[in-house]
Image (cartoon, rainbow, N blue to C red):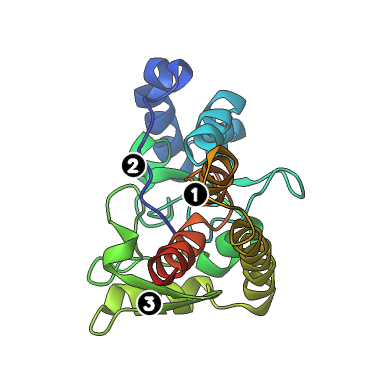
Amino acid sequence: MIKIEKLPKPRVLSDNEEQWTDEYIRRKGGDLSVPKAAETRYRHPDIKSTLRLESHDKCIFCESKISHVFPGETDHIIPSSKKPEYIVKWDNLGYVCKECNRNKHNYYDDRVPLLNPFIDEPKDYLLFVGPLVFPKPGRIRATTTVEKLKLDRSALIERKKERLQNVQLLLERLELFPHGSAREFLLEEIEAEADSSREYSATVRQFLNQALAEG
């Protein structure tokens, strides 16, 4: 998980947020004159594409790339079942993978909310050790986030291992290059592996920070 900068809300939401929110609340209140579509307008293609862009096509929680294997889902950080007035609130929407969305379900506790990568700085709460992620000592929200989203699930760990193995191969190649422009180019390529757009960038950043410091 990394800190994510929220993009400006798409035009379709700026134009319709108030009306869509009102109609959703009325629909949930039993006003069947409001179309059933009022319950799913947060999935509008323009909204989803902007969410996908701001997260670099990654799940905002586990950082898995999504669209090459699954369409991705629009998630309410605070579930609309808890806060119906947030049904299309821009700051409450994020792009997530199916697994994290399923694990999160409708969890919300205002005393112990999950980490919000649009507000919180994840590295202040989480430790990344190889392919593993741990809550920092005393960080109850971090513990809850890791456990609830199952950020230590085996499939996620295996995929992170693959990423780190590829980065390790690049580091080993770097040792074979003498100082010069070719070595500098390869070093830039290695550092780019930790870019926010890359899969599991928080994990790779920590791995590279340690490896380059030792090297």
The three-letter amino acid code for the residue at tag 2 is Glu
**Residue 128 seen in render:** yes
Residue 90 location in percent, x, y? Answer: 38, 35
Q: Is residue 147 left or right of residue 139?
A: right
Task: Identify the residue at image location x=34%, y=56%.
Answer: 116
The three-letter amino acid code for the residue at tag 3 is Thr
- Disc 2 from disc 3: Cα separation: 25 Å
**Residue that numbered label 1 is attached to:** 191
* Up/down of 194 relative to 166, above or below: above
Q: Nearer the viewer, mark 1 or mark 2?
A: 1
**Residue that numbered label 2 is attached to:** 85
The three-letter amino acid code for the residue at tag 1 is Glu
Q: Is residue 197 left or right of residue 137?
A: right
Which image quadrant for residue 134?
Answer: bottom left
Q: Residues within 10 Å of mark 2 (few under 14, many from 20)?
A: some
Mark before the other along the chain sequence, 2 or 3: 2
Mark before the other along the chain sequence, 3 or 1: 3
